[in-house]
Amino acid sequence: MIAKKRTAFTLLMLMLLLTGCSPDSPPSSNARGEPDRTTDTWSSSFESKGDKLDFLERYLIFFSEVEDAEFHVVYYDNSGGLIPGPSDWDIRVALKVAPEDIPLWTDGMEKSVPDQIGIGLWDGLKTERVTWEERDSPEYWKRPDSNTYLVVYPESGILLKIASTVYKPSPY
C-alpha cells in the first residue's frame, strides 16, 4: 500500500514538473505575477503605428522618439513554471528616428567591426516607410558584455538593432 502511494506521488510530481516546463503550454504569469511575455511577433501583424510601437516598447527601451519601426520579436519567457529560468530572445528591429537622436541610441556602446553583423539580418523588415540606402555609409556599434548590436545610417536616421541571447556573431 505504501509503495503504491509513493508511486502515485512520484507520478504526480513528474506530471507537475513536466507540465510546468512544457514549451507548448507557457505559464500565464511569471514568479513576480507579471503576464507571460512569450511571443513570436512581426510588426506587420499590427494595423496601426501606435499599436506597433506600444507592443515594441514592452521588449525594447526607446532612447528617443521613434518615427516608425519594423520588427520581429521572438521572446521565450522562462520566468514562470515550476522551475523558473532565464528567458531567451531574438529581437530584430529597424527604427526610423531623427538623425540628431542617434547619439542617444549609441550612448554606452562601442564602435564594432562591420564583419560581425551582416545587414541581411534585417532584410525581412524593409518597407516603403522604413528602408536604408546603400549609399548612406553605416556605422557599427556593440554594447559591451552584451549580444546587442546596432547598424546606424546617420544621414537617414535608420537604426538596425539586434538584441539576442540566441544569435552568435561571426568572430572578427
Image (cartoon, rainbow, N blue to C red):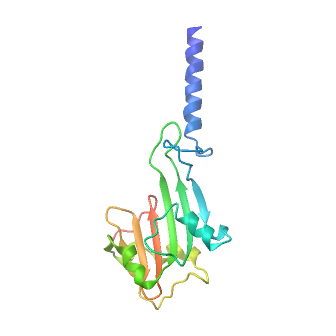
Q: Residue furthest right?
A: 47
Q: Give residue 110's quadrant in the image.
A: bottom left
Left or right: residue 170 compared with residue 110: right
- Estimate the x, y position of residue 14 in percent, counting from the top left: 56, 29
Residue 134 on image: x %, y % = 48, 88
Percent position of residue 55, x then y:
58, 63
How far from the left and from the top, in percent, is residue 36?
56, 49
Left or right, residue 15 beside residue 83: right
Q: Residue at the spot x=36%, y=78% of the render?
A: 103
- Establish if 104 lies above or below 134: above
Q: Foreground residue, 56 or 85?
A: 56
Quadrant (top left, top right, bottom left, bottom right) of the C terminus: bottom left
As rendered, which of 6 and 25 lies closer to the eye?
A: 25
- Vertical comparison of 90 with 5: above or below: below
Q: How many numbered marks are there?
A: 0
Q: Is residue 124 above or below residue 26?
A: below
**Where 80 falls versus 2 (above or below)?**
below
| Residue at point 52%, 60% (across, down) | 58
